[in-house]
């Protein structure tokens, strides 16, 4: 069942879902990007919410940090903010674990700057400096917050 209240009653529930992109706030887009519809919701939010409420539960959003665009150029799937027309599948308040080939972060209970810093560290190294600049412009990160790259 996709009932999050039933899922939440299952101890140690683990769910693994994919995403198109994740922004520095922890918002997850798994359906559309910039108005381009790609996939349906399925039970993603139900399972993320259910695992969030499950005793010992873990909800994972897994994605590669980059994708090649139509022009062959590498594009980051970790982005500063979701573009207009992008559907938020999982809101930042329910985003739990985000995973790329560069590691994982548990966003539960983190401040906005801690989320941004952790998510930037999941991005491809080629894009990290630009993401830091964007986070500074959004006023969600500043040099004094930096722990270690």
Image (tube, rainbow, N blue to C red):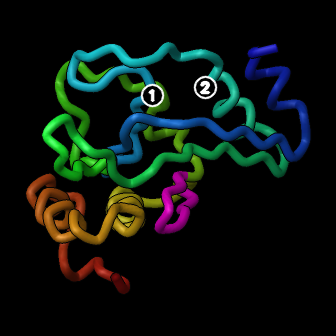
The residue where tag 2 is placed is: 44
Q: Secondary structure at mark 1?
A: loop
Q: Quadrant of residue 106?
A: bottom right
Going from N to C along the chain, the mark reached first, 1 or 2, is 1
Q: State the residue at coordinates (50%, 13%).
A: 40
Q: State the residue at coordinates (12%, 64%).
A: 133
Q: Quadrant of the C terminus?
A: bottom left
Q: Is residue 135 above or below residue 16?
A: below
The residue where tag 1 is placed is: 30
Q: Is residue 70 above or below residue 4?
A: below
Q: Residue furthest front?
A: 72
**Residue 20 in picture, x, y percent from top left:** 40, 35
Dot 1 and dot 2 residues touching (CB under 8 Å):
yes
| Magenta residue span | 98-106
**Residue 138 in picture, x, y percent from top left:** 14, 53
Q: State the residue at coordinates (35%, 61%).
A: 123
Q: Residue furthest bottom?
A: 148
């Amino acid at each position: 069942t996709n009932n999050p209240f039933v899922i939440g009653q299952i101890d140690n529930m683990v769910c693994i879902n994919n995403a198109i992109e994740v922004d520095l706030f922890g918002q997850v887009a798994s359906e559309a990007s910039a108005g381009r519809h790609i996939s349906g919701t399925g039970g993603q939010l139900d399972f993320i919410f259910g695992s969030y409420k499950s005793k010992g539960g873990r909800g994972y959003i897994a994605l590669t940090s980059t994708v090649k665009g139509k022009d062959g150029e590498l594009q980051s799937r970790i982005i500063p903010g979701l573009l207009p027309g992008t559907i938020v599948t999982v809101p930042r308040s329910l985003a739990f674990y985000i995973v790329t080939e560069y590691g994982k972060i548990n966003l539960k209970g983190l401040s906005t700057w801690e989320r941004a810093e952790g998510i930037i560290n999941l991005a491809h190294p080629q894009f990290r400096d630009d993401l830091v600049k964007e986070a500074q412009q959004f006023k969600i990160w500043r040099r004094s917050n930096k722990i270690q790259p």
